[in-house]
Amino acid sequence: MHLKSLALIAASAATVTACATGAGPGSHANEPIRALLSADVMMFISWDTNGDLVVSPDEIEAGINREFERADANHDGRIEPIEFQAWQNAVLGGSQMGPYRLDFDRNVDNVITREEFANEIHARVRDYDTDENGSLSRAEFVRVIGQARPATMPGMQTTPRVGSQRPGGGP
Ligand SMILES: [Ca+2]
Ligand SMILES: [Ca+2]
Ligand SMILES: [Ca+2]
């Protein structure tokens, strides 16, 4: 009994330490904190055009095309930094939350091609799609804070997806 109590206290202390930077008032130290971690959820939800609360593969492809056309304001097939900023403000609600420009612009040449745009969205879909059925349900958007995304492509770095890059991107 006594030993068991000690073990529980030790476990609680460890949990509190682990959550020290993220736990707010009223949070439960023994429970993982769940939240929406990225502004792209707003975009994905808006792609559910038939309103069945599931974003299907067809809706994802249509959404990628629609968002690329929206972002590429001058229709030259590339998203420039100023175009990305306008799209980010309109679709993601500002630049404070990811995805950031450099999440898309993988070769850092200041231009996001249609392929780069689609690749990043597909990677994010795979990241959210925990049951791997190709569709995104509401529950799949809710994450445990601090959960890192595993590598999804050969050669990709296994860096955490959220907050790994500066808001607004680099040069
Ligand atoms: Ca749907
Ligand atoms: Ca453009
Ligand atoms: Ca799914």
Image (cartoon, rainbow, N blue to C red):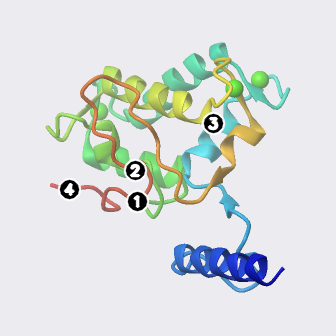
**What is the C-alpha distance between the residues marked 4 and 2?**
18 Å
Could you tell me the amino acid type at mark 1? Gly
Q: CA distance from mark 4 to mark 1?
A: 14 Å
Name the spot of residue 19 as percent of width and height, x first: 57, 74
Looking at the rendered structure, the kind of residue marked 2 is Pro
**Residue type at the position of mark 3:** Phe
Closer to the observer: label 4 or label 1?
A: 1
Give the Cα separation between the discs numbered 3 and 1: 19 Å
Rendered-image quadrant of the N terminus: bottom right
The residue at 70%/19% (across/down) is 56
Q: Secondary structure at mark 2?
A: loop
Question: Where does label 1 land, which residue?
Answer: 163
Q: Callout 4 environment at 10 Å: few (<14), some (14 to 19), or many (20+)?
A: few
Q: Is mark 2 within 8 Å of ligand 3?
A: no
Q: Is residue 12 above or below residue 107?
A: below
Nearest the viewer among 147 and 99 is 147
Q: Pointer 1: residues within 10 angstroms few (<14), some, or many (20+)? A: some
Query: Image quarter for residue 169?
Result: bottom left
Q: Of marks 4 and 1, which one's residue comes earlier in the chain?
A: 1
Question: In the image, which is nearer the foreground, mark 2 or mark 1?
Answer: 2
Q: Is residue 70 shown left or right of residue 81?
A: right
Asked whether the viewer can see residue 49, the reply is no
Q: Is residue 113 left or right of residue 2?
A: left
Asked if the residue under mark 1 is in contact with the one under mark 2, i.e. CB atoms within 8 Å, the reply is yes
Q: Quadrant of the C terminus?
A: bottom left
List the residue tagged with mark 4.
Answer: 170
Q: Quadrant of residue 110?
A: top left
Q: Nearer the viewer, mark 3 or mark 1?
A: 1
Reading the chain from its start, which is encountered first: label 3 or label 4? 3
